[in-house]
């Protein structure tokens, strides 16, 4: 019987999964993903996690429970820092400990620590340790590490695109990768916008140079990597006359978004050529209400463009 | 230049002394009131943590009194405090205030920057003057913490706990006016003597509760609704795990994590939380376990709503509580926290501790 490693389809999975899956595949390890987010997972997660936790962390509890009796190992990396002098959100740093305390009868956890602040080799080191659980062949692990890196880079390169349309409205959809890519959490907002005839651009569509260019406008370097991508994208797009509006997706209880969202919102509201809307997502979000708001938002922009 | 700064517990006493002795014109924000909170809540992002909101209230009230320079701390993450100043600047700018904000970033981020900001505020101050001013302010800070620690214990023995609080407040008023280091120490001794002269019942064996959590809400009585005083009046010995003097040395000189004390906390937390999570999350876990080892009856965790490090800690505390049979009460504080509900929960918690102790000594529970 081959060993099965479970990967919860939540949080940073949406940013890293091509790399993660490639790594395990190269090692010949079978991976099992949790089901895509659904009502049952939300309900379980909300029940297990503490009330104050943010919605995505609650969802992660549900995804872990979904995998519990299907796998031998559970892959739950402790990602502390992926860029120099930056961090990810504290809740992600403590995620394995939270899951361990809140859920009983877990399969064995695989929690490599990735802390770029300690050493630039920390990812390689973590992968070597992780791989050693499945094979003694160091070369194979190195190869898997390299291939995973390639897969991850290719995935993000393929996502980049530039704004093409001249006559359609362009709306920037800002938010964490785990909100943008999880159809259930975001209530299919991207498709809904497309159906309204809007071209959508997200931080994932921008190159890291473009994001860096935007983030350089911050008065103080931001120490959260993923939020830096969001605000970098926003600041980059502010300077170009390409977008008509910004929709900011934030999850209930997200700490960094509370501050970063405020900075983006204030900057957007000072200008009259960019419309701004903020959507807070949680277990109570309803599709009907969302559609109404999106329609109103798009109509408002169209009116303005025509009126001008 | 009229300088102001945000409140945090009794921090204003030390800061005011430091700035005054450096020849700065200080406008202290008025004490935190409902209005301060309302102003903060009105202009801050909804999901920001409570300290940010109260800071905003403090700034506005100080600017209204004529302050034009705000001095604030910075940070390098991952706690949100490190980015407070950037957001607060935007809020105040949009409100149209004319002011300058000086953010003292910790040494380890960029020390050239630190010196630059420092020089900007204190450009006309000789270094020897600075050292003596710093020493006095630092002594005040330490003396307040010592007195506070003592008062938190003695309330539990006093027949009238309110009179201990009264003596403590009188001590703080005297301290504010004192400009001599030696006099400060005699003030503490005087406070202790006066408390010992009160009607005390030293035969009592009071319950002991440790307080852990996020520093701002632990230090600022307005946010925790005078938790220490309330528990003291219920006849409980209270011990705080965080004091301002610890925080300052930790935040400005960042050598605290190397000290043995911090190592001990990390070691204690290890079975439950293996990694630091910013803020005081790891300390909350470690100190809870240390309180258990020291034989405390219970632990209270204080956290502002949406505080990220404390959410991690709060998720883990129930497991510690279960495994070690240690009652832990997590109190999440925000602008909606009300006095009545708060007292009810505290009373229930203290009753539970008393009952548990009686059970353990074999007493009968009806």
Image (tube, rainbow, N blue to C red):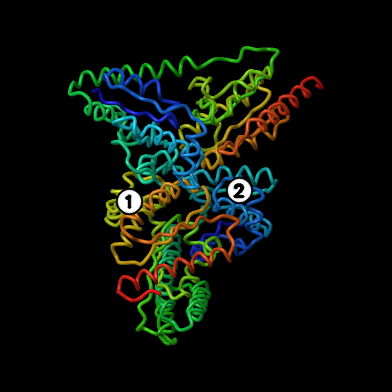
**Who's the residue at 44% across and 67% down the image?**
B136
Q: Are marks 1 and 2 in contact (CB under 8 Å)?
A: no
- Quarter placement of the N terminus of chain B: bottom right
**Who's the residue at 41% across and 57% down the image?**
B247
Residue B100 shows which numbered tag? 2
Residue with the mark numbered 1: B257
- Callout 2 environment at 10 Å: few (<14), some (14 to 19), or many (20+)? some
Disc with the residue nearer the chain's start (1 vs 2): 2
**Rendered position, A269 above or below A30:** below
> Which image quadrant is residue B23 in?
bottom right
**Rendered position, B8 above or below A191:** below
Q: Secondary structure at mark 2?
A: strand
- Quarter placement of the C terminus of chain B: bottom left
Residue A202 shows which numbered tag? none
Residue B268 in sight in this render: yes
Image mark 2: chain: B
Say which of B144 and B311 sits in front. Answer: B311
What x and y, as percent, mark residue A144?
28, 19
In the displayed structure image, the side of residue B352 where residue B57 appears, left or right = right
What x and y, as percent, mark residue A185?
54, 31
């Amino acid at each position: 019987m081959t060993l099965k490693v479970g990967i919860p389809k939540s949080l940073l999975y949406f940013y890293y999964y091509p790399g993660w899956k490639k790594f395990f595949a190269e090692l010949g390890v079978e991976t099992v993903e949790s089901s895509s987010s659904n009502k049952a997972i939300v309900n379980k997660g909300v029940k297990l996690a503490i009330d104050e936790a943010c919605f995505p962390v609650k969802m992660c509890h549900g995804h872990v429970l979904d995998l519990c009796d299907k796998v031998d190992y559970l892959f739950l990396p402790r990602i502390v820092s992926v860029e120099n002098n930056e961090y990810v959100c504290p809740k992600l740093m403590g995620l394995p400990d939270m899951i361990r305390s809140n859920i009983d009868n877990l399969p064995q956890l695989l929690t490599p620590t990735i802390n770029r602040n300690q050493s630039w080799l920390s990812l390689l080191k973590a992968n070597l340790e992780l791989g050693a659980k499945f094979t003694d062949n160091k070369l194979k692990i190195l190869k898997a590490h390299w291939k995973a890196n390639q897969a991850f880079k290719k995935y993000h390169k393929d996502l980049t695109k530039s704004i093409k349309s001249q006559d359609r409205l362009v709306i920037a959809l800002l938010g964490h990768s785990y909100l943008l890519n999880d159809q259930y959490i975001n209530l299919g907002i991207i498709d809904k916008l497309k159906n309204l005839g809007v071209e959508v651009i997200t931080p994932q569509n921008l190159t890291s140079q473009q994001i860096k260019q935007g983030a350089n406008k911050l008065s103080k370097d931001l120490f959260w990597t993923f939020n830096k991508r969001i605000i970098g994208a926003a600041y980059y797009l502010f300077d170009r006359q390409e977008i008509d509006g910004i929709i900011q997706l934030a999850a209930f209880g997200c700490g960094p978004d509370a501050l970063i969202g405020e900075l983006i919102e204030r900057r957007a509201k000072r200008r009259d050529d960019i419309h701004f809307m903020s959507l807070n997502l949680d277990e109570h979000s309803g599709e009907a209400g969302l559609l109404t708001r999106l329609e109103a938002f798009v109509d408002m922009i169209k009116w303005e463009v025509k009126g001008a | 230049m009229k300088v102001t700064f945000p409140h945090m517990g009794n921090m204003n006493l030390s800061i005011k002394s430091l700035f005054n002795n450096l020849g700065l014109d200080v406008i202290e924000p008025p004490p935190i009131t409902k209005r301060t909170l309302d102003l903060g809540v009105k202009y801050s992002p909804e999901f920001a943590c409570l300290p940010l909101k109260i800071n905003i209230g403090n700034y506005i009230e100080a600017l209204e009194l004529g302050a034009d320079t705000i001095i604030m701390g910075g940070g390098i993450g991952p706690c949100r405090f490190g980015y407070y100043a950037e957001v607060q600047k935007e809020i105040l700018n949009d409100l149209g205030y004319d002011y300058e904000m000086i953010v003292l970033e910790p040494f380890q981020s960029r020390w050239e920057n630190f010196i630059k900001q420092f020089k900007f505020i204190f450009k006309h101050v000789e270094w020897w003057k600075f050292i003596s001013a710093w020493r006095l302010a630092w002594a005040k800070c330490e003396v307040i913490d010592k007195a506070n620690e003592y008062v938190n214990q003695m309330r539990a023995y006093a027949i009238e706990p309110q009179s201990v609080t009264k003596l403590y407040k009188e001590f703080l008023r005297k301290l504010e006016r004192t400009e001599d280091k030696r006099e400060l120490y005699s003030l503490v001794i005087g406070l202790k003597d006066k408390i010992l002269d009160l009607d005390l019942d030293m035969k009592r064996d009071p319950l002991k509760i440790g307080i852990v959590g996020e520093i701002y809400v632990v230090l600022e009585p307005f946010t925790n609704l005078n938790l220490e005083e309330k528990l003291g009046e219920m006849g409980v010995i209270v011990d705080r795990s965080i004091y301002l003097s610890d925080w300052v040395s930790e935040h400005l000189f960042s050598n605290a994590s190397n000290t043995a004390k911090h190592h001990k906390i990390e070691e204690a937390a290890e079975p439950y939380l293996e990694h630091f999570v910013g803020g005081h999350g790891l300390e909350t876990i470690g100190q809870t376990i240390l309180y258990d080892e020291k034989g405390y009856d219970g632990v209270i965790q204080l956290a502002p709503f949406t505080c990220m490090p404390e959410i991690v800690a709060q998720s883990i505390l129930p497991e510690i509580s279960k495994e070690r049979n240690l009652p832990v009460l997590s109190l999440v504080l925000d602008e909606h926290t009300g006095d009545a509900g708060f007292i009810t929960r505290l009373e229930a918690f203290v009753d539970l501790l008393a009952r548990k102790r009686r059970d353990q000594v074999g007493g009968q529970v009806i």
